[in-house]
Image (cartoon, rainbow, N blue to C red):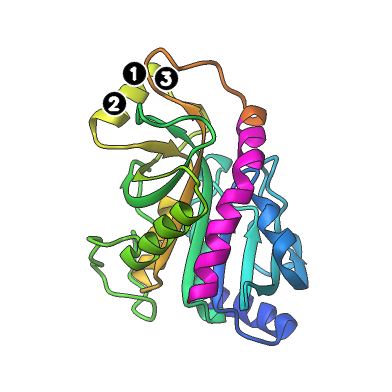
Amino acid sequence: MLEKIKETATYIKNIIKSEPQIGVILGTGLGGLVEEMKIEHIIDYKDIPNFPVSTVKGHHSRLIFGEFSGKKLIAMQGRFHYYEGYNMKEITFPVKVMKLLGIEYLFVSNASGGVNPDFHIGDLMIIDDQINLFPENPLRGKNEDDFGVRFPDMSETYSAELIAKGVEIAKENKFTVHTGVYAGVTGPTFETPAEYKYLRIIGADAVGMSTVPEVIVAHHMRIPCFAISIITDLGVPNKIVEVTHEDVQNVAEIAEPKMTKIIKEIVSQL
């Protein structure tokens, strides 16, 4: 696996010619950030050696490199999910490639369901902790010592410094932003009312089908992480309605400019 990671990183390096400082993973309906980039290179996933290809509507399956808020940035416009049939090594493969490309920070976005009764559809939640409900950990197996230690500490999975910056930027721009715990589940089904209740009981504020594996791997490699969720539906008693993937996309696209503004301002301060 390490040789494949190196092969992929070398292929991308030969195209972009310079090191990105920031890595970004964009979720469902959240690809608008690239419109604010000064794009230098676009590479389709299908053209990258060893790279998976996203199969989900709303994920464009391309790697975009350029300048964003004064920094060199590489963005995944489309990510990979466990429910697509990919294993944890495949899902997190791009994060390891970005590490070898030189990223110093990882920003992650997603669309998620809110289980905190104080949340409303369209709100933003900066993730300050997570619950891994996937059936396995992406670090399972032989440890890759080149990347990190066998037993990484997870007491500050998300950077407290970046969270503080995000909260302050949201306040300055009068955005409604919460901080909270994100629970990662396999999908592809949306949760039942009983599952929403369970998630709230165990401490989650929001639930989604991504983010957790990528952040575990980035944290293992000592990359500071910042993640933000757009609350696209509610798993709260008396507020649960039938939801479709299209509904999730529509809400995410409306709220996306606020998320982009927060990330842009944080990046400018790094």
Q: Secondary structure at mark 2?
A: helix
Q: Residue at x 51, y 16 (%)?
A: 241
Read off the residue under disc 2: 198
Q: Nearer the viewer, residue 57 or 119?
A: 119
Identity of the amino acid at label 3? Thr
Give the mark count. 3
Mark 3 vs mark 2, CA separation in Å: 10 Å
Asked whether the beta carbons under mark 1 and mark 3 sit within 8 Å of each other, the answer is yes
Marks 1 and 3 sit apart, C-alpha to C-alpha, by: 5 Å
Look at 62% across and 47% down and name the residue there. 256
Q: Which residue is mark 3?
A: 192
Magenta region, residue range: 248-269
Asked which secondary structure carries label 3, the reply is loop
Q: Amino acid at mark 1?
A: Ala
- The image quarter containing residue 56 is top right
Q: Is residue 230 above or below residue 75?
A: above
Q: Is residue 242 above or below residue 18?
A: above
Q: Main secondary structure of the magenta part?
A: helix
Compare residues 75 and 87 and report the one nearer the observer: 75
Q: Describe residue 193's horizontal placement relative to residue 43 as left or right.
A: left
The answer to whether residue 210 is magenta is no
Q: Give the residue at mark 1.
A: 194
